[in-house]
Image (spheres, rainbow, N blue to C red):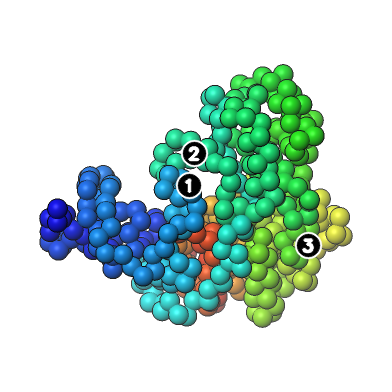
Amino acid sequence: MEPSQSDIWKAVKLVATGKTLCQHESGKLAFAYGPLPEESIVAQEVALQHQTLHIVRWELLQASQERRIAACPYYESCGGCDWMHINEAAQSRFKREMLTDALKRITKIDVPPGTITFYASPKALAYRNRLKLHIDNKGRWGLRAHRSHDLIEISNCLISNAKINEVITTLRKLGSVPPFFSSCSQMEIRASSTQSSALVVFYPKKHAKKQKLEQLYASLEGKLALSIAGHPELGPSIQGWNNGSLELEIPVTAFVQVNDDINELMVERVIQGAKQRKLHSVCDAFCGAGNFILPLVKAGLTGLGIESHPQAIQSAKATSQRLGYEQQVDFIASDAQTALQELNQRKQSYDLVILDPPRRGAKNLVDYAAKATRSHLLFCACDPVSLARDLKAFLERGFALEHIELFDLFAQTHHFESIVWLKKAHNVASLP
């Protein structure tokens, strides 16, 4: 049966949420997951959600040449690699367009996609160095289904590296419901390039009994490297990670970027940018265990690292001491807003302020960061909409946009990382 014209929609563009904006011949707009620009789809189920139309189920009527068959056997059910059905060249173009679209809509700056430097991931697959898996109440484990809490029990992950897949294979050999797993809610497999095998970090449930955790540890010890979060007597609490510039000591529960190759490139580009601008001091407001600030210190800058994760800041200090950087850099265990406010009160400023905030952005830090920098501000952001909102606030205060780089940190997904350089004007306005 031929589809009714009333059911046919045209895919217009991919947006920052990972959805596709689609248009009906009547002019109606709706969002859907999966269609590529210029494809025609037949809507099988349309729902109104939060005053917006969503095409929940659809059938492909006319395919784009940029569409391919996803290589992963879990692609249709897993919620992870939402762009695996798009070839790499198109992924690159779409990500540029998503960023420029957000900048144009929110900051009103028209940045041609071709002027944004794009750094592709050297590995399209097998690039992830860590993978978080969920554990249900029965002890079964796997990834979450798309937009669901349903569990997908995987036996491999194509975007994760060989060390991670070796651990997955070992865990699967333990059976579908390994003993004592139900005492934990999650586990993360972390594969550092400095270690021959990956480390599995288990996250206990809130009221998990110590005896069960000890039994879990004993049952796996010798089969794989493991650690129980919050229990330093049950496995290592620190891992060595190499970011291309130096080896960092990072808590096993702390954040690390998932793509070693791209992270090394990002660190290298930040160092080059600071040298080109002849910057001598830096304040990193979300320094973690030192991913950016310690390589900058190695390159000759002095400065301050701010981090709210207490173990991460302790590790940054430990690495700094090991490398003999105590005279060049200080660290503060604090949230960014409180620390920047205190810097403002002391009239303390730096040539460069780095903001690498969570996905929600740094809206609450704009005035404080503006006062804390004498020359430049660097944004590192994983969400183009939050980035554009924050940039708009700085541009309104007199900062000038200098340079934008896009890093394909998360190949096969709609996510990416952006680095933006801003130059401070002599007189910067603040909020009334």
Image quarter (top left, top right, bottom left or bottom right) of the C terminus: bottom left
Q: Which kind of residue does numbered mark 2 sit on?
A: Ile
Horizontal and vertical percent position of residue 212: 69, 20
| First in sequence: mark 3 vs mark 2 | 2
- Can residue 190 be seen in this snapshot? no
Q: Which kind of residue does numbered mark 1 sit on?
A: Tyr
Can you name the residue that lies furthest to the front here? 1
Q: Based on the displayed image, in which of its 4 quarters is residue 321 positioned? A: bottom right
Instruction: Pick the residue in front: 44 or 187.
Output: 44
| First in sequence: mark 3 vs mark 1 | 1
Q: Residue at x 54, y 52 (%)?
A: 358
Q: Indicate which label's residue lies in the foreground, 3 or 1.
A: 1
Instruction: Pick the residue in front: 391 or 290.
Output: 290
Compared across the picture, whether 120 is left or right of 43 comes to: right
Q: Residue at x 58, y 42 (%)?
A: 155
Q: Which mark is residue 246?
A: 3
The residue pinned by badge 2 equals 152
Q: Which mark is residue 219?
A: none
Q: Which kind of residue does numbered mark 3 sit on?
A: Leu
Horizontal and vertical percent position of residue 394: 47, 67
Query: Would you say the residues marked 3 and 1 are in contact, meaning their CB atoms lie under 8 Å apart?
Result: no
Q: Based on the displayed image, in which of its 4 quarters is residue 423 positioned? A: bottom right
The residue pinned by badge 1 equals 74
Instruction: Pick the residue in front: 80 or 44.
Output: 44
Q: Residue at x 58, y 46 (%)?
A: 156
Asked which secondary structure carries label 3, the reply is: loop
- Can residue 144 be seen in this snapshot? yes
The vertical placement of 302 against 241, above or below, is: below
Q: Residues within 10 Å of mark 3 (few under 14, many from 20)?
A: some
Compared across the picture, whether 431 is left or right of 246 comes to: left
